[in-house]
Image: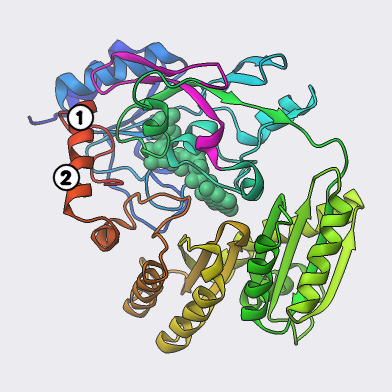
Amino acid sequence: MVVSSSTIDLLVKALPHGRVITDPDVMDSYARDRTFLDPGAPLGVVLAAGRDDVVETMRWATEHRVPVVPRGAGTGLAGGATATEGSVVLSLARMAEIRELSPADEIAVVEPGVITADLDAAAREHGLMYAPDPSSYEISTIGGNLATNAGGLRCVKYGVTRDSALGLEVVLADGRILNTGRRTVKGVTGYDLTGLFVGSEGTLGVITAATVRLRRAPLTAPATIAAEFGSLRDAASAVSAIIAAGCQPSLLELLDRATLKAIDDWRNIGLEPSVAAMLIAQSDAADGADAARRMHDLCVEHGASFVAVSDSPAETEGLIGIRRMAYPAKERLGSCLVEDVCVPRSALPDMMTAIEAASARHDVLICTVAHAGDGNLHPVFVFDHGVPEPPKQVWDAADEVFRAALDLGGTLTGEHGVGLLKRRWLELESGPLTRDLQAGIKGVFDPLGILNPGKAI
Ligand SMILES: Cc1cc2nc3c(=O)[nH]c(=O)nc-3n(C[C@H](O)[C@H](O)[C@H](O)COP(=O)(O)OP(=O)(O)OC[C@H]3O[C@@H](n4cnc5c(N)ncnc54)[C@H](O)[C@@H]3O)c2cc1C
């Protein structure tokens, strides 16, 4: 079907005034996510203010066979929210109401545009917390987190977004409204459609509300350690030892030297030349001080040159702040291909070694941070600002890192999703049977292929 410019006029008329943007300059900011990818030109951007706008948009899209790219805050790192040529970008950011917060049931019912940190802050007023905390939690939306099954710093103890998702309201490709799941803690009626939609990157339906699980917030400030190592491999070995010893950290993050140097050049954190890696670990358990002491000892046993232990909220905030500076600090160095491999935690030292080897072999600056307690590494491949996309040696280094992760029993993406960026490596991880079954599932929910086509599978 040919989509003419008058097609978008029909949508403009069908929705309340001001909901559809067609100005190319304004549309451009809604067409990109946080990757370097150049988007296609969308026909329009819908700023949905409620479920009815989404239903209307999907009915129109089905009638006119127009691709729809759902969008939260556009902080994605895989190209999932990148607009494709002739699509309509469907922004859920204005649907940002926390509809219900029930301390008795320890749940919240939220709209997709709620900012992750806002939900956590609202829960804290009742002694609860919303556990999944991607580093982007102050700027990403719950809808985007659900669609990517986002992870984060606390996931090592509390699980990823899927572990907090109980039920969803989803607008299907043809505009029908589906309610999945429940508001109970348990429930096994039928197939787990909630689990299926979580992580589906906007390819199966548009999430318009979610019932999420809240947890008791820890009563005391967490005990935190920061350990410096002269060898990256030693730091990775300490991570494996901490997990194996059952310390049950609530946060276990690793920063390599290149990342620390980028932060130091920016914010002067007093980095010593001998430091090759830093480990930041926390325990928020009632016996957190004991756990921190055990983690301290394990770091020393594995070669740490310096370990600080603290339960001061201000010091803790400062250390976590260093971790959260990692991405913006790297963006100052150049354009970034941010990768996201995940390996079994015991394979972390070998994965670190493989990344260092790829960096040296291809002469590419790779700065790595890791949600180390999950075995989830973010090697960030830095290339010149102003170059439209990564040069060949960056892709070659990335290819080597992906293959190493798979050889170690890992996966291509731990939390950012496949989006556009990782599709070309999918076959390395999933065989033809998986590919066919996934295409079959897509066909059930989106027979015309209008929901975020070309992404994720
Ligand atoms: C500094 C920084 C740090 C980050 N740290 C982390 C981290 O620690 N852990 C992590 O997992 N990610 C991290 N990310 C990546 C990103 O923030 C997450 O992927 C986040 O979940 C995306 O949310 P968003 O609202 O920006 O979604 P978008 O980027 O807008 O969209 C992401 C995907 O979700 C789909 N989508 C969005 N909303 C909906 C909806 N309502 N219904 C259906 N589909 C939808 C889009 O089509 C797209 O495929 C980081 C990003 C940055 C910039």
Mark 2 or 1, closer to the camera: 2
Residue 124 seen from this side: yes
Name the amino acid type tagged 1. Val
**Quarter of the image that includes the N terminus:** top left
Amino acid tagged 2: Asp
Residue stretch in magenta: 160-186
Q: Is residue 334 above or below residue 55?
A: below
Q: 360 left or right of 283?
A: left
Determine the residue positioned at 67% across, 75% down: 235
182 or 359: nearer the viewer: 182
Q: Is residue 94 covered in magenta?
A: no
Q: Which residue is mark 2?
A: 436
Task: Name the quadrant containing residue 7.
Answer: top left
The location of residue 144, given as percent across then percent down, is: 48, 37
Relative to 104, does residue 375 appear above or below in the rendering?
below
The residue tagged 1 is 66
